Amino acid sequence: MGDIDAMTGARVLVTGGTGFIGRHAVRALRARGAEVHLLSLHPARVPEIGIHVHVCDLHDHRAVTALLSTLKPESLLHLAWDVTPGTYVTSLDNLRWVQSTLALARAFVAFGGRRLVAAGSAAEYDWHAGVCDERTTPLAPASLYAASKVGLWHILERLCAQTGISFAWGRVFFMYGPDEAPERLVPLMVRAAQRGRALALRHPAQVRDYMHVADVGAAFAALLASEVTGAVNLASGSGTSLSVLAGLVGEAMRSVVAVEPGAAVTDPYPVVEARTTRLREEVGFAPRFTLPDGIQDTCAWWAGQDRMTNA
C-alpha cells in the first residue's frame, strides 16, 4: 500500500506537473516527503514552493536525455500529454507524444530509474462493458488518442518487464474540479446556472464515474508510492447520471441547471463506471471528496473567479 512516508527523500521527476491533474499530484508527492523535480516549459507556473523546476521541452529528446543523465531520478510520474478539448481525440500529435514518452522512458531506464507510473485513460476500454475492470474488460480504443494510449501501455509494460523497472498505469476516468478547461462539462453546467440558460445534453440519463481532480492527483501519488504494478483504475467507483450532476451544480450555485435532452437516439454507452478494487485494496487509496462536496468546492472556485473578474 501507498505508505504516506514511503517516498521520504525519494527523487521524483514529474512531467505535466503544472497541468490540471499534475499540480495536485505534485502537492501530494510533497506531502509524502518526496524530492520533486518538475520538467516544464513554463518555469513561472510552479504549483508548489520547494519544487525543483527544470526548463525542458519533452519533445527535445536530446535535452531530456541530458537532464536525466544528471538528475538520475528514482521515480518518474509521467502525466504530460496534449488533451486540448475538442481536438485531442483525433490529433496527430498523439503520435508525437507516444514517441516522446518512449524516449523519456528509455532515458529513465538508462540512468537508473526504478519506478515508473504513467497516465492512461478510461477511453482505452470497451465501453459496452458498462463497469470497467482492469483484468477482465477488453480494450477497444475508438480514437487515435485511445489507440495511442493502449499502444504505449503495452510497449511500456514490456520495456519495464524486460529491464526490471516497476511499472504502473493509472487509467483516469471522468474528472472535474477548480481550473478545469471552460469547454468541459462541469464548467458548462456552472455557466448555465450563472446565466439562467438551458444546457443541451444529448443523453441526460447517461451515467459516468466522476472524481475530483485533487483526488485524481493524490491517487497518482499513492500509486507511485506503492509497489502495485499493472493497470489501475483511478476513479470513484460510483456512477452518476448527467442530470443528477447538473442538479448538484445547480444546488451549489443556488440556481437551476435546466437540461434540454437531445433527440431520442439510443445511447451506445449508457453506463461507464470503474471497478476500483485495486485502487482501494491494493494501493490503499480512497477519495477525500464525495461528489456533492467536490461539486461545492468546484462551484465555489468558479464563483471566486467571477468575483475577481468583476472586481
Image: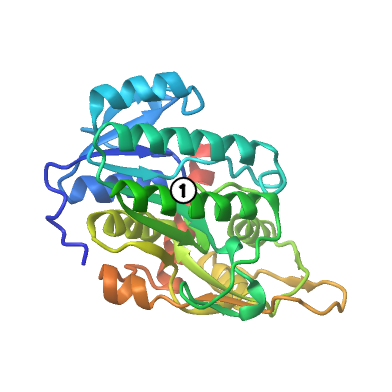
Q: Quadrant of the N terminus?
A: bottom left
Q: Is residue 279 above or below residue 151?
A: below
Q: Is residue 165 above or below residue 98?
A: below
Q: Nearer the viewer, residue 231 or 225?
A: 231
Percent of width and height locating residue 292: 45, 73
Percent of width and height locating residue 60: 49, 22
What residue did someone put label 1 on? 304
Residue 256 relative to residue 102: left or right:
right
Residue 148 relative to residue 104: left or right:
right
Percent of width and height locating residue 58: 46, 28
Q: Nearer the viewer, residue 70 or 204?
A: 70
Q: Residue at x 65, y 66 (%)?
A: 140
Q: Nearer the viewer, residue 152 or 257?
A: 152
Q: What's the colour scheme?
A: rainbow
Q: Residue at x 42, y 59 (%)?
A: 170
Residue 165 relative to residue 151: left or right:
left
Percent of width and height locating residue 198: 75, 65
Q: Residue at x 85, y 77 (%)?
A: 265
